[in-house]
Image (spheres, rainbow, N blue to C red):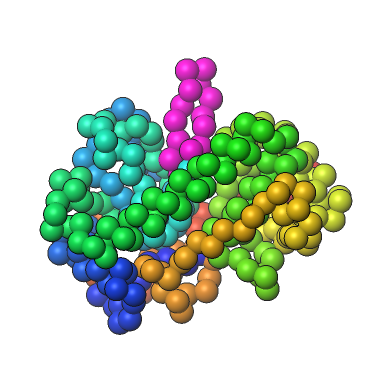
Amino acid sequence: MRSLPDIERVNTATSAGSAVRAVVKSCNSVAASYESNTNIQHEGDRSDSIYIVKSGWVFSYRVLADGQRQILYLHKPGDIAGFPGLCSEHALCSIRSLGDCVLYPIPKTVFTSSTFLTPPIASYFMRKSAEMQSVLMRTLMAVSRMGARDRIIWLLLMMHDRIGGGPGREEIELPLNQTEIGDLVGLTNVSVSKTLCQLSAEGMIERRGSVIHLRKRMEMQRLVGYEPVDFTWDILVSSNDHSRTGTDEKPVREAETIGSSSGSQTSVRALDRVSDN
């Protein structure tokens, strides 16, 4: 998992990345660390901030009237969580950490000010908004029109693109367990397990715990009509960090100031394993 470098230690970056880092630092944002499975924001609560994900994965979700959970979006490092809350005084969805993560909270009053939204900043957030809309459109098509098998294939391909896979990188490490996969694509835990077993038996994928090797990625793309998406990582993410799992800071219960660093490293939570059993 790639993660945002500490503000103080950034030497080179694109103009957009430099501008975002500088404005986050200037507004005295505090990098808050959250442990795995922590609710960062609750649906319906007063919403005063949006969040830039520094490291780890978080997801936005809503709970339906019958108690079922629908995961709406997975946020990776560099993404904005809580963005829909800009149009409401109250949070439109809840935000929860998938593993240990670090977020930069940006007050809404700061985010909407003319001093914050300079051209490079506006350009960056417009791109992130476009990426989010692209994912949401594809998710809607998959959930509403595809069967269980095709939904799982679609999800694996989308995660391959979002995690930063390419022609020479056919492995992905899912930050989701089977229940969370089901909550994202509208399937039961049993259906997810059976479908993964089916794809494994067909030779489409090979599983080693949470790591999945896409053995026939091109054929999978053809089966579901998937068109690869180029999600740029290096606007805010260090180009030297090629790891796809873990965070660069030790998770703590209390917030830490931007620019501080910890000498130790820790990995993202021990994921629930997706087994063949």
Residue found farthest to the bottom? 11
- In terms of secondary structure, what is the magenta stretch mainly? strand
Query: In the rendered image, is residue 253 in sight?
Result: no
Which quarter of the figure is the C terminus placed in?
Answer: top right
- Residue 70 is inside the magenta segment: yes
Q: Residue at x 38, y 35 (%)?
A: 94
Q: Which residues are magenta?
A: 59-72
Q: Quadrant of residue 20?
A: bottom left
Along the horizontal axis of the image, is 228 left or right of 29? right
- Front residue of 8 and 263: 8
Residue 110 seen in render: yes
Classify residue 95 as left or right of residue 276: left
Numbered marks: total: 0
Give the image location of residue 22, x and y in percent. 21, 68
Q: Position of residue 113 (x, y in %)?
A: 14, 51
Determine the residue positioned at 39% across, 40% down.
95
Please give left or right for residue 33 compared with residue 118 in the image.
Answer: right
State the residue at coordinates (50%, 42%): 136
Q: Residue at x 15, y 64 (%)?
A: 26
Question: Is 244 covered by the magenta stretch?
Answer: no
Q: Position of residue 54 (x, y in %)?
A: 36, 60
